[in-house]
């Protein structure tokens, strides 16, 4: 019984260390002129991929992005750094389209880490 309690507490502690609270803020999206250019991770940006730029999350992190105005949700992979002050995320045009903010240019989002990259 004591071993089960120890394992349970260890798992909770482990998850607590690696879980991150959701972030909320403004998201924008990449202009078409960036299509084909290298990202900070070294890969080429593709406007039709579900990728994102974030200030601090590790490259390869999978995030769940929810448009707080519409409730629409996507999953994207971080592969770049965001250059904009006051914004927490830059998505590809495909991501902005799926979240229904392509015409507006920006929207309020919640960003949740789903999976950290393998080390």
Image (spheres, grey):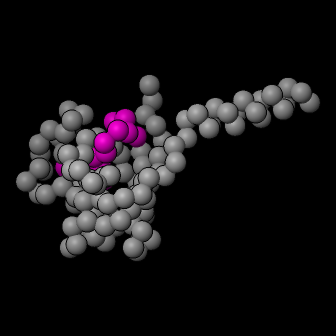
Figure check: 63 above or below 43: below
The reply to whether residue 76 is in sight is: yes
Residue shown at the point (19%, 39%) measured from the top left:
39
User: Does 39 lie within the magenta span?
Assistant: no
Left or right: where does residue 36 sit relative to residue 18?
Answer: left
Residue at the farthest right position:
1
Residue shown at the point (20%, 46%) measured from the top left:
83
Instruction: Out of 65 and 25, give the one closest to the viewer.
Output: 25
- Residue 18 x, y percent position in the rendering: 55, 35
Figure check: 80 above or below 1: below
Residue span colored magenta: 46-61
The reply to whether residue 48 is in sight is: no
Instruction: Locate the N terminus by quadrant.
Output: top right
Figure check: 83 above or below 40: below
Instruction: Locate the C terminus by quadrant.
Output: top left
Residue at the farthest front position:
86
Instruction: Out of 36 and 52, give the one closest to the viewer.
Output: 52
Q: How many marks?
A: 0
Figure check: 43 above or below 105: above
User: Does 52 lie within the magenta span?
Assistant: yes
Main SS type for the magenta part? loop
- Residue 70 x, y percent position in the rendering: 40, 74
**Which quadrant of the figure has residue 8?**
top right
**Which quadrant of the figure has residue 67?**
bottom left
- Residue 69 x, y percent position in the rendering: 39, 73
- Residue 16 x, y percent position in the rendering: 62, 38
Residue shown at the point (22%, 58%) measured from the top left:
29
Left or right: where does residue 105 sit relative to residue 70?
Answer: left
Instruction: Out of 5 and 118, give the one closest to the viewer.
Output: 5
Residue shown at the point (89%, 27%) measured from the top left:
2
């Amino acid at each position: 019984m004591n071993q089960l309690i120890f394992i349970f507490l260890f798992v909770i502690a482990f998850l607590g260390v690696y879980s991150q609270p959701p972030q909320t803020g403004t998201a924008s999206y990449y202009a078409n002129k960036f299509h084909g250019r290298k990202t900070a991770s070294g890969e080429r940006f593709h406007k039709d991929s579900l990728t994102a730029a974030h200030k601090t999350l590790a490259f390869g992190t999978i995030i769940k992005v929810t448009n707080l105005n519409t409730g629409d949700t996507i999953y994207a992979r971080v592969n770049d750094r965001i250059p904009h002050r006051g914004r927490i995320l830059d998505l590809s045009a495909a991501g902005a389209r799926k979240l229904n903010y392509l015409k507006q240019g920006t929207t309020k989002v919640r960003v949740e880490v789903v999976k950290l990259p393998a080390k």
